[in-house]
Image (tube, rainbow, N blue to C red):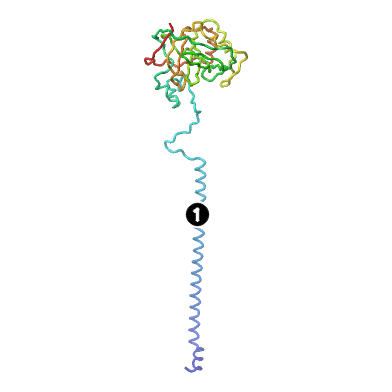
Amino acid sequence: MPARKTYSLLFHPVLHRLAASLLLLGLAGGAAHANEAKAGEESLDVLRQRLAARLSDKAVTEGRASVKTKAAKPAKAGAKPVDKEPKHAHWGYAGEVSPERWAELNPDYRQCAIGTRQSPIDIREGIRVDLEKIQFDYQPSAFSVLDNGHTIQVNVAPGNALQVMGRRFELLQFHFHRPSEERINGRQFDMVAHLVHKDPEGRLAVVAVLLERGQDQALIQTIWNNLPLEKGEALPAPGQLDLSQLLPEDRSYYTYMGSLTTPPCSEGVLWMVMRKPVQVSPNQIAIFSRLYPMNARPVQASSGRLIKESN
């Protein structure tokens, strides 16, 4: 086509209007696509903002739940409560902590229920034999008095001992029970003193001195004069104590194998019960009764144990 004719066609009115329309349609389409892209971008931003908000809310909620769980975590079903009791559970002579329930208070006390050589016993039908004499080696010694919550206990300085059956037992301490834990042919006495000894191998030997109502006893009065005002605090006493003054003049005795009469009720204890009681005054008995009116374990089954008695 000649150049002149082509030039005239470009400027033809109809063609000019058609080109303008196409141009407007192209611009409109581009604007629409731009608006759609912009709207898409805006929608994506909104989604991102919503997602961020949800994640933020979830983190806050979980944080609060974690704090709440740490502050007060509920106990699991069947979980055992925390034991705040000391290792050695409280025991006593009446109510929920009476001797019949000692074994339930602490697994270490199970011997109190299942032991077959328990003390005290009612001493009957002892075999009379020529028992060797107990060699007491007691001397004046410093002492302290302790109210341990179960009885009045006297701690004596080292150097006191006894010898029997070829063994030497050092005195650890002595204490009191009311009424007497031991019985002799069914008879129970007003009180008893238990003198606890131990040999180098750890074996225990206890001498029981029965106390009956009568005259003042000088050594007992010395102990009462030094009673501590507070429980659990041993009070050093002035002067000295001579334990030989607590023993009866007649040193004949009963002997058998038994146990401690307080928890953990350990067995394998050599018992020597003095046959003749020592007198204490009604007032001296009353003083102890003010503190411990009853701190005696009931008698236990003898279970066919051999009991020997001095001729």
The answer to which of 282 and 16 lies nearer the viewer is 282
Which percent across, then down, holds residue 207?
49, 13
7 shown above or below 245: below
Query: In this view, which residue lies farthest toward the right?
Result: 238
Query: Which one is in front, 77 or 309?
Result: 309
Vertical side of 169 occupied by 14: above or below: below
**Quarter of the figure with the C terminus:** top left
Image vertical order of residue 219 relative to residue 58, above or below: above
Query: Residue furthest toward the left?
Result: 304
Mark 1 sits on what residue? Answer: 55
Q: Give me the residue at 50% from left, 75% from top.
A: 30
**Which amino acid lies under the numbered mark 1 shown in the image of this protein?**
Leu
The residue shown at (48%, 72%) is 33
Q: Residue at x 60, y 18 (%)?
A: 236
Closest to the observer, 283 or 168: 168
Residue sitting nearer the eye, 81 or 147:
147
Q: Is residue 92 left or right of residue 141?
A: left
The location of residue 176, given as percent across then percent down, is 51, 14
Q: How many marks?
A: 1
Q: Secondary structure at mark 1?
A: helix
> Farthest residue in the front direction?
166
Is the residue marked by circle 1 packed among few (<14), some (14-19), or many (20+) residues within 10 Å?
Answer: few
Residue 22 image point, x, y percent: 48, 81
Residue 201 coordinates in the image, percent (x, y): 48, 21
